[in-house]
Amino acid sequence: MRHVLQKVSAAGLAALLATTAVAEDRPQVVVVNKALEYFAERLLDDSTDVVFPVPEGVDPSFWRPSISDISRVQSADLILLNGAGFATWIDRVSLPRSRVVNTSAAIEDQFIVTESITHSHGDGGEHSHEGLASYVWLDPVLAIAQADAIASAVIARDLGAAQDVEARLDTLRSELTELDAMAQEVLSSVQDVTIVATHPRYQYFARRYGLSVISLEWEAGAMPGDDAISELAQIVEENDARILIWEAEPPVAAIEAAQSLGLQSVVFNPWASQGAAGSFLDAYKTAVSGIAGAMGQGSN
Amino acid sequence: MIRALALAGFVAAAPFGAAAHQLVVFASVDCQAVTVEAKFSNGRVTQQGDVRVLDGENNLQTTLQLESDGTALVPLDSVDHSGGLLIEVDTGSHDNYWIVTPEDIARNCGS
């Protein structure tokens, strides 16, 4: 009996090791956000693993990786960066230059510079921080450029047959183009409406569709405090804002608080972090329809 | 404050590094030592600051002071670097870090 158990254990261990070996042998593509994961998975077949290493609940823009996280990233076959200042950790590690691709390199002339925040601390005197809006993929046209860059990188590194990758890219490009057309049409009705966003995520989205969006700095999915609600009330009063975009589902009480200010709430997950469900395209369509629909509800 | 963040104020322009004066930390490694360099992103040399060296398990290995030229030298034989090293620099008003993996050390040591 003991002999049998030993054989079973040995077989199990061998199977486990074989599985692990196969998993480790598979090409690895590391991405820095959820949207890039979606695009990469659309362009690659099942023989390649797409790895988004940032844990759920962590903002990938400000993720602080462990040493072992970086060891894994360094060993990847391809590392897809977003560019535009997204993911601060990439400037704090050595990455293998030949395997790193900045997916927004071709669209840098379309980046949005964010306004500065002036403050002072320490001995540095008064100074300002400026940066780039980094959620470029929320403009579907820029998302196509990122998908193009991913496809080129995948083909160049032989991670997929060129013909297959190009066919998948054609499909993805078509779907993003359709999404853009749909958004253009649907959002034309809200171009003269002031929208408030709970976080500065939607700059490229707003620019693409001619929307006026004022951004707050609220924590995703959390109940805003009284001060935050007061500031929101002031913004609503000064700008006649009608729609509030949340990047994550807020508590019911938060929606009610916004409603009491005359704001219709819409959840628009920007697809940066883990936890985004379904497909990027469906989530985007739902959010766009929600924004247009919110205006209809608000006017009733 | 919130209005200062208003999106309506964005402008399109050529990209540049974020923040005018953030602390930039860089570390290079050879077989003998990790050389840490710290400066502000506006080019100003970081003349003083603590350099904390942590191992792969986040245990503090040693704390050094930056030299007046913004550098610090961490001899490899003075730390347990088998699991890589996390280099943190803190000037009191700014801080940043650099990750040195075991592979970085092995690669730069020619093994």
Image (tube, grey):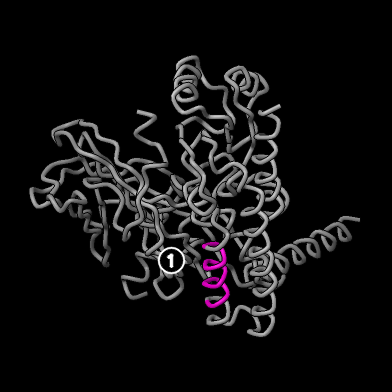
Q: Does A146 lie within the magenta span? A: yes
Closer to the camera in the image, A25 or A300: A300
Task: Look at the numbered disc 1 and give the secondary structure of its residue.
Answer: helix
Q: Quadrant of the N terminus of chain A?
A: bottom right
Q: Does A182 lie within the magenta span? A: no
| Horizontal side of residue A139 vs A250, given as left or right | left
State the predominant SS element of the stretch in magenta.
Answer: helix
Q: Residue at x 45, y 69 (%)?
A: A100
Which residue occupies the extreme top position in the image? A226
Q: Quadrant of the C terminus of chain A?
A: top right
**Which quadrant of the structure image shows residue A182?**
bottom right
**Which quadrant of the structure image shows residue A158?**
bottom right
| Residues in magenta, as a range | A142-152
Q: Which residue is mark 1?
A: A107
Which residue occupies the extreme left position in the image? B68
The chain letter for the residue carrying disc 1 is A
Q: Amino acid at mark 1?
A: Ile
Closer to the camera in the image, A178 or A51: A178
